[in-house]
Amino acid sequence: MKRKKALVESRRNKVFEILKNNGHVKVGDLAEEFDVSPLTIRRDLQYMEKNKKLERFYGGASIINDKQFTNEEDEVALYRKLIANYAASLVEDGDTIFINSSSTALKMLNYINDKRVIAITNNGKAICSEHSPQVIIVLTGGELGDVKEAMVGEFAINNLERVSAKKSFLGCSGLSVESGMTTEIMNEVNINQLMIRRVTGSAYILADHTKLGKNSSFVSCKVNRIKNIITDEKADESIVNTFRSMGINVHQVSKDDVF
């Protein structure tokens, strides 16, 4: 066991050296270099991403500077990954989950490992997402939107009405005490509502601090229907406290979190 652990640590150190020297790496190249499976390399990269040494992208990873952000957008992007990582930690072996068109919710698929999971989503980008072979992706079908590649319309709605899930993870455009969960795209409202209504367990709203207190055009879920929110440490304290006073569980991630 100790020998195996030492081999894993040695390979990961070598991978990181290659990453530092080149700035980026590809899963396929590393698998060939170390004579291991692509899944093994993906796990190595995921481990290093959790320790904030790199940033994964589809098919590879790039180097990052520890806790250094060139602008506010970089920081928000990190928080969204931490939110997705935390959300993935709530998924259990054997779960069926709903994921909506949110890019943050879709990132969850990168972090679900060693669990047999069925992910039902209307996010067309799921086709190209990086995920464990134990995660089965089921697309709702429907009309494919031009902007977000979200599947909407009667076909998607009819398919969702035939299934249920243990948990749902939904991103949003805005989340406020006054309006609840809102979106900018009208055709996604019915999809979001179904993904909340047809859950046998818990529904989670994923919203980084830039989304809290913001109201978008169309309401997907009124605040009295919200049970769980996942946000980050920079969320407005007064808004978070108000949500909690209403009996809503608010989970907050921080830059120091390692899941």
Image (tube, rainbow, N blue to C red):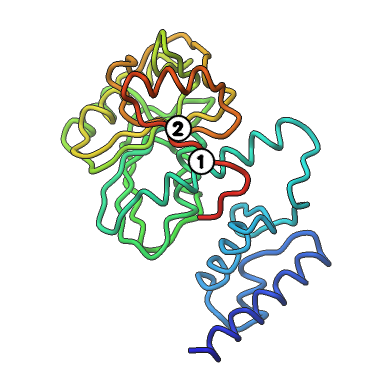
Comparing 208 with 61, the one in front is 208
Spatial CA span between label 1 and label 2: 7 Å
Specify the quadrant of the image occupied by residue 178: top left
Going by the numbered disc 2, the residue's amino acid type is Leu
Pick out the residue farthest to the right.
Answer: 21
Question: Could you tell which of marks 1 and 2 lies nearer the N-terminus?
Answer: 1
- Please state if 153 lies on the left or on the right of 70 as rendered: left
| Vertical arrangement, residue 30 with respect to residue 172, above or below | below
Q: Is residue 168 left or right of residue 165?
A: right
Numbered label attached to residue 6:
none
Identify the residue position indicated by label 1 in the image. Answer: 83
Up/down of 235 relative to 27, above or below:
above
Q: Nearer the viewer, residue 100 or 176?
A: 176
Circle count: 2
Name the residue at 23% across, 43% down: 166
Disc 2 is placed on an element classified as: strand
Q: Which residue is mark 2?
A: 206
Dot 2 crowding, Cα within 10 Å, few <14, some 14–19, many 20+: many
Q: Position of residue 181 (x, y in %)?
A: 40, 19
> Residue lying farthest bottom?
3
Q: Nearer the viewer, residue 236 or 93?
A: 236
Q: Residue at x 29, y 16 (%)?
A: 224
As shown in the figure, which amino acid type bears the numbered disc 1?
Answer: Ile
Contact between marks 1 and 2 (CB within 8 A): the answer is yes
Residue 113: x percent and y percent?
42, 61
As drawn, is 118 to the left or to the right of 210?
left
Q: Is residue 72 left or right of residue 7?
A: right
Instruction: Indicate whether 183 appears above or below 148.
Output: above
